[in-house]
Amino acid sequence: MTTNSLPRTLPAWIKALDAVVLPAFADVHAQVLHALHDSSLSMGQIAELIKQSPVMALTVIRDANRHAASPAESLEVALSRIGLKRAEALFALIPPTQTCDIEPALRQIILISRHASQQANGLFAARLARLWQEIHWSSLLFLSPIWTLVAAHPQLLSIWEQRVLVRHEPVAVVEREVLGVSLPELCAALAAHWGLPEWIAMGYRMLNGNRRMLIKALHIARDNENPLHQQQMLDADPPLRRWLTLPSNTILLANGLALSAHHSWHDIHCLRWQWLTGLYLQVPLDQLQQMVHQQAVTSAREIGPTDLWHPAQGLLWPSGSRFQVAQKAPLPNAEALAAWRTHCRELLSERSPYDNVLQLTATACKALASAGMQRVLLMVLDRKQHRLLAQQASGLGSAAARLILQPEQSQVLSRLLDKPTLLRLTPDNAEEALTGLPEALKSLFPSAHLLLRSIGLGNRVFMLVVADQNNTELNETNLQAFGKTVQCIERALVTFSKRGK
């Protein structure tokens, strides 16, 4: 899907996104369904289990608030309102999905929401203890309209990152060109349609129509080293002082901190949100930064090992930016290398052990993964050589299995399919090369360290291999293993083509 085929108006977007069914992590989904039939558990205990799945929590709160006179501000209230039978019926509609099969873009935006919730809980919940439920759920669900947007169109996240964060294009221009509407307006409309907690609506209203108040507060917040002067300026502007102390602002501040840190801890946007948060909490900037960093680390620990980017990783390098940090890809361990040799021996068999191409490409995909490639996509040309069809994938979301590309619509793909060729993307050439690749492919591989290799059979290109190591810099060992694996695949294709002769 191209950006030209996306909805262009608010009503069209709301209709499209309201129909999106978000997946839930399979293990949590099973635990919750089991808990619903456990009579020994209280409503609060069941709500605690559901908290592990933001998607399931969103589903309950949306259903409870859609036609309610007053919104339920917490999951436990929403669950009590709809009852366990209705909750079970709702969860039955949510597809339980393994983590590796959920779109990386969707998992990434939910990770940012979980980080924002940790920031809100750590910075504000203890100070506003009676409001901790509102703080927790509103901060976690603030970006939920974007969850559905990214689930439906995962390529939009990489487009946004490249154009806004990397190329520094004006946000308003990108929003209008890509979406046809303002993103905060779309989020506000969807939040109202779903009946999300009022603090979420207030946050989007602030971004949409009251940015002047934010700018005035930021002007005062910059003077962080002079708290007495800050207080005098606030006393001189009572409406601003009253607005600044609103508890609902904690939601906007927490998500501003999490979103800006996702790009870089040292970017001016991150500093602005830190200034504003320091003004709200009335603490010096250095103390505030220490608190924010601690909450980021706590968030990373709770989420655990992941193939996604967590801002806490940026604290380990001076640059602090996910677009600047050049991590070295890890070398395959002994077990992986043993598996790689086994797969390669199979590919190099003198008599082809495969009954069809699907079996051959399955072994090829396993060999590439064992060689250290963390994300792999194998596509084959159809008989008329008009389309590239996904046949095998590893480390990618479910959309990879359905991917179909039209080579004539991409100059880069057309060149790769002229003859067997290797295209290696690095930060030096990535920007130019990525502009020539289909958006659907870029959304699967949001990477500046990417390998694209076309493989021939006879006089024509038969297959395209796309692989990377989660946007980490490839070392020579990994490149050599990739090259040798491709040679094995080429030999396997020749042997397979001669079977029965």
Image (spheres, grey):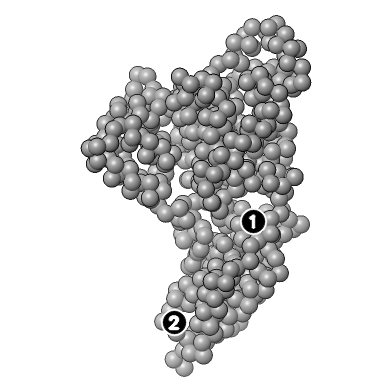
Q: Residue at x 44, y 91 (%)?
A: 500
x and y, in percent, of residue 231 in the image: 70, 11
* Up-down relation of residue 146 to residue 126 (above or below): below
Would you name the residue on which mark 2 appears? 354
Q: Residue at x 38, y 50 (%)?
A: 27
Which amino acid lies under the numbered mark 1 shown in the image of this protein? Asn
* Up-down relation of residue 343 to residue 9 (above or below): below
* 7 left or right, relative to 77: right
Q: Between 274 and 122, which is closer to the camera in this rendering?
A: 122
* 400 left or right, relative to 167: left
Q: Residues within 10 Å of mark 1 (few under 14, many from 20)?
A: many
Decide if residue 228 is in sight here: yes
* Up-down relation of residue 308 to residue 241 (above or below): below
x and y, in percent, of residue 10 in the image: 50, 32
x and y, in percent, of residue 45 in the image: 33, 35
Q: Residue at x 45, y 30 (%)?
A: 137
Please identify the quarter of the rendering in which residue 130 is found: top left
Would you name the residue on which mark 1 appears? 471
**Sequence order check: which comes first, mark 1 or mark 2?**
2
Please identify the quarter of the rendering in which residue 262 is found: top right
Which amino acid lies under the numbered mark 2 shown in the image of this protein? Tyr
| Secondary structure of the residue carrying numbered label 1 | loop
Decide if residue 380 is in sight here: no
| Secondary structure of the residue carrying numbered label 2 | loop
Q: Cα distance, mark 1 to mark 2? A: 33 Å
* 22 left or right, relative to 165: left
Please identify the quarter of the rendering in which residue 54 is found: top left
x and y, in percent, of residue 116 in the image: 55, 34
